[in-house]
Every structure is written in structure tokens, then in C-alpha cells.
Image: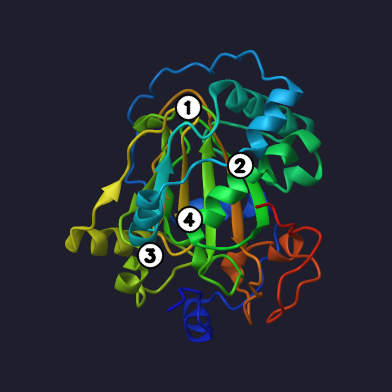
Amino acid sequence: MSGNVSQTHAARDGLDTAWTGDNNEWWDWYLTLADNGGDDSPLLELVEPPALPEPTADELEALLAEAYPVTPEQVAAFARDGFVKLQGVLPPAAVSRLRRLLTEHLAAGGRDRPAGRFTSDELMWTQSADIAAFVLSRRLGRIVADLLGAADVRVYHDNVLAKEPACGRTPWHFDDHHFPIDSQQVATVWMPLQQTPRQMGPLSFARGVDLHQLVDDVPFSTKDASYDRAVSGAFADAQVSVEDGPFELGEISVHSSLCFHTAGPNRTTAPRMVLATTYFADGAKVVPSPTLVSGEWQQFLPGAQPGEVIDTPMNPIVS
């Protein structure tokens, strides 16, 4: 069963309209739906990670073309839990390069990055060949294809997600609610660009790919944190296991669009920067009726129409 928002739920919950703002306005709105509980603890003093000597162009090209060895145990864990964390996908030097590229990208775009903000941008790969080398890499695409059991995967879109110091929680959600892709073979690579302790708000996962069924009848609110609180309460009552551990440098997670996840506040003095890229199995279609929580989906699937197979130049095969 797909978790895509049904027309009945969309009408009931006020989601049966299109988003009219930009992507950062969407995030500004979306984070207001998280229950933050008034956390005003002192921020942990952290400094920006030091720049490391970057790999040469030839070294990076070879690395990103090489398949990461996904094991049968990891495939089984992904199918069962809805997510998997993989260590050593990129060496620290490559991660350092990517952090520099994305930091420069945000600065070049004139992005205001005040404390407490969730700063984002997307489709960077269309603007920078250096960033595209990562987003469109076989290294990442093949990981997702292997975990999904798909012959090939396409890019939906990339995101730089900078949770600035003192930024609050990301609410509990699952991406099948958001993505206008009519398939369960969709997954997101979440790649932190620094060591990410718990205080920085790493991505956290509810263990169980079918947990969306537990909260399927919870009304989604576009105005307050009631949905986030209800999901959190339901998971607590059901004693759902949550993976909320830190990320090492070079470690990534891959989560299914059916996996419920959240992220804590950034209670440190350094920004939590992440490259998040979503991929989907070749042959997937656009859902019949995208909703408010799909955001600016038309720019990610330009020209693709509801009900049609997705095959646009903005969604290349990368595996």
C-alpha cells in the first residue's frame, strides 16, 4: 500500500492545493509544524570543520564511478526497517570538498543564514558541474538502486540543508506524503558534511518500513504541531524503536519514502550541513494529484504530467 496522500485525506487535511512559494519559504513553513517543547538549553560550542586537502580531479572521478559494496544484510535491513546507515561511503577529503562547494553555492546565491534558520537550496547540480559530479555519481545512484532492487534509478532532486545554530526540530514525516512520485521505489541519500553529534540534530528514523500504517488516520495539520505530537505519541505508545545516533564523517543514511523520520534541533554553534538527494526507480509515474506538501514539484519534474511516466532531462538515470 502506498503512503501517498489520498484525495480523501488531502481534502480532509487541507492539502489539495498547490504550494505557491519558493523552496525556502516551504521549509520556513514546514518547521513551524514541529513540536519543539521550548528547548532553550545552552548551545554546545563547536567550530566549523577544518578544510582538508581535496582529492585531485582524477581521484574524485575514479571514486565517484566506483560502486560501493552494498551487502545482502544491508539490503535486508533496508527492506525491513526502511533505512540503513552506511559508513565510509566518501573519504573525509571528498566530504570536505563537497561542504566547501555547497557553502560557496549558498554564499554566491546571497542566502541569508541567520541563527535559527533552516537554509536550503535545490537543483545545485544544474548550476555546478562540481556538485553534479556527486549528485549524479554512480557511487550514490548504485547504492540506491541496489537497496531498492531496481535496475536503474533517476534523480528527483538534490537539496542542501543547512540547519543553522539554534534551529529547531524537523517534524516527524515520511516522504511518500511529499513526493509526487507514484512508486514505493523511492529513497533519499542523506549525507552530512561534518561529524554530526546528537546535539546537532542528525536524522533519526523510526524502525519499520510499514509504520506509516500505524498513523495513517492521524489528520495532518498545516497550521500547528498537532500531527508531529500525535505521531510521536503513537510511536511511544507502540514502543517503536528509533535510531537517533550520530553520524561520522563520510557516513550516509538511505531512507525509503515510506520510512518515518525526524531530526532534532541544532543545539550547537555550528551549522549542520547536509546534501540530501532523492532517487527513484526508472519507470515511475507522477501521482494523479500532487498536493500542498509536494512543494515546487514542477521544477523537479518539468514537463511531466500527472499519471505519466517520468522521463525528463532533469531526471537522468544515474546508476
Residue situated in front as seen by the camera: 312 or 235 = 312
Could you say where residue 10 lies in the image, as x and y percent from the top left? Answer: 52, 79
Q: Residues within 10 Å of mark 4 (few under 14, many from 20)?
A: many
Is 71 displayed left or right of 110 in the figure? left
Q: Is residue 102 visible?
A: no
**In the figure, is residue 10 to the left or right of 72?**
right
Which three-letter amino acid code belongs to the residue tagged 1? Leu
Q: Is residue 20 above or below residue 7?
A: above
Count neighbours of disc 2 (C-alpha within 10 A) and say few if under 14, some if 14 to 19, many if 20 or more.
many
| In the foreground, 86 or 203 | 86
Estimate the x, y position of residue 274 in percent, counting from the top left.
Answer: 55, 37
Whether 134 is drawn above or below 57: the answer is below
- State the CA–CA distance, disc 2 to disc 4: 13 Å
Do callouts 2 and 1 mark residues in contact (Cβ within 8 Å)?
A: no
| Image marks 3 and 1: residues in contact by CB distance under 8 Å | no
Q: Earlier in the sequence, mark 3 or mark 1?
A: 3
**Could one spot residue 195 in this view of the protein?**
yes
Label pair 4/1, CB-CB below 8 angstroms: no
Amino acid under disc 2: Arg
Q: Residues within 10 Å of mark 3 (few under 14, many from 20)?
A: many
Residue under pointer 3: 227
- Position in image of residue 111 (x %, y %): 71, 36
Q: Nearer the viewer, mark 2 or mark 1?
A: 2
Q: Nearer the viewer, mark 2 or mark 3?
A: 2
The residue at 41%/43% (across/down) is 85
Question: What residue is disc 2 on?
Answer: 139
Q: Are marks 2 and 4 in contact (CB under 8 Å)?
A: no
Camera-nearest residue between 2 and 267: 2
Q: Which mark is residue 147?
A: 4
Q: Nearer the viewer, mark 4 or mark 1?
A: 4
Q: Distance between the Cα atoms at labels 2 and 3?
A: 36 Å
The disc label shown at residue 249, or none: 1
